[in-house]
Amino acid sequence: MFTHCLVCHTPFPPNEELEYFSVSTRVAYDAERGRLWAICRSCKRWSLAPIEERWEALEELEKAVKDRAKLLSQTDNVALLRVGELDVVRVGRANLTEEAWWRYGRELTQRAAKHKKLAFIGTAAAGAAIMGGWAPGGISWLGAWLLWDNAPEQVTEAARWLRFGGSAWRGNRSCSRCGHVFRTIAYRDRGQVILSPGTGAGDALSVTQRCPLCGDLGDGGLHLRGKEGEYVSRRLLAYHHHRGASEQRVRSATRLIEEAGSPEDLTRIVIKEGRRLGDLQRTGAIALEIAANDTVEQRLLELELAQVEAHWREEEELASIIDGELTPLPLMESIRRKVAGIR
Ligand SMILES: [Zn+2]
Ligand SMILES: [Zn+2]
């Protein structure tokens, strides 16, 4: 089996999901026509697997997809799936229900893992500082205790600052009631920020801040809607959940979205006409972050899917020529029948 892209010779990173086709972490297949490709991350072209090595791999892939794949997105011709660490393009419509919000849930659990790592580095760094201070006798017990206790928090706070900066929004808006000028929404004030459902079609969330001068939040106050509201609310929620969430929490949150019916319905249920971020229950808030980001990811995926479909058309044309010329037809037919489940 090849280990490099047949077009640009970039080595494929091997996957640990498949026994019979471990060459690449991005693969494409067509069970019906008996095709199997490794996709290059560098040039995006597809390398067709030698025909005699497709048999087991195709069966294994189809089984992995049926048993444990998560559907990212699909068109009538191709489906984009994930099996563990493996990206899979399956030609034909996958008979799976789309778990749209699952995609962003992964980002939250990864954030939690990273936070744990940072907290651990913080503890290790504090340990080193304590040991270092200990030698010349320059650190008190109290100092050591304070350092030990607070260092992980400081490390993760620093990481949060590096990632988000100090404010979720900067601009220049006036309160239409009293003329007070809004210039920033600081993250530390996020608990008071009101999140409400988007106003236009396709708008995720709006952001409202009460006017600190006249107290109004109807006509007056600060209102961020449309793309701006979506962007700022996603920043606020991500900052709020900087530590991420456990897989169990993400599961509960996605269950809420499932029961609500759609990300939009979930948003309406959790924040109704509008609620302060600080008043939200944790699971509801996590579900809200997942729902808010899913709309955006969906848009990006649709772009990617259009590209994948264009590649598939080219590669399939090539594959049909290669297979047709080099492969005895009966073998091809038997692969096709076996994998497609035709007896
Ligand atoms: Zn390549
Ligand atoms: Zn005002």
Image (cartoon, rainbow, N blue to C red):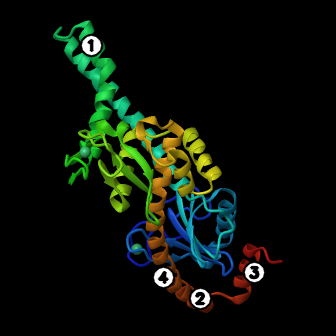
Which element type, helix, strand or loop, lies under badge 1?
helix
Q: CB at mark 2 closer than 8 A to ligand 1?
A: no
Residues packed near mark 4 inside 10 Å, few (<14), some (14 to 19) or many (20 plus): few
Identify which residue is drawn at 29% across, 49% down: 220
Residue where numbered disc 1 is placed: 144
Residue mark closest to the camera, 4 vs 3: 4
Who comes first in sequence, dot 2 or dot 4? 4
Who comes first in sequence, dot 2 or dot 3? 2
Residue where numbered disc 4 is placed: 310
User: As shown in the figure, which amino acid type bears the numbered disc 4?
Assistant: Ala
User: As shown in the figure, which amino acid type bears the numbered disc 1?
Assistant: Ala
Residues packed near mark 1 inside 10 Å, few (<14), some (14 to 19) or many (20 plus): some
* Residue 208, position as x, y percentages in the image: 35, 48
For the residues labelled 4 and 3, the Cα–Cα distance comes to: 28 Å
Who comes first in sequence, dot 4 or dot 3? 4
Q: Which mark is residue 114?
A: none
The front one of 113 and 331 is: 113
Identify which residue is drawn at 50% across, 53% down: 291
Who comes first in sequence, dot 3 or dot 1? 1
| Image-quadrant location for residue 51 | bottom right
Residue where numbered disc 3 is placed: 334
Residue mark closest to the camera, 2 vs 4: 4
For the residues labelled 1 and 4, the Cα–Cα distance comes to: 61 Å
Q: Which mark is residue 320?
A: 2
Residues packed near mark 3 inside 10 Å, few (<14), some (14 to 19) or many (20 plus): some
User: As shown in the figure, which amino acid type bears the numbered disc 2?
Assistant: Ser
For the residues labelled 2 and 3, the Cα–Cα distance comes to: 16 Å
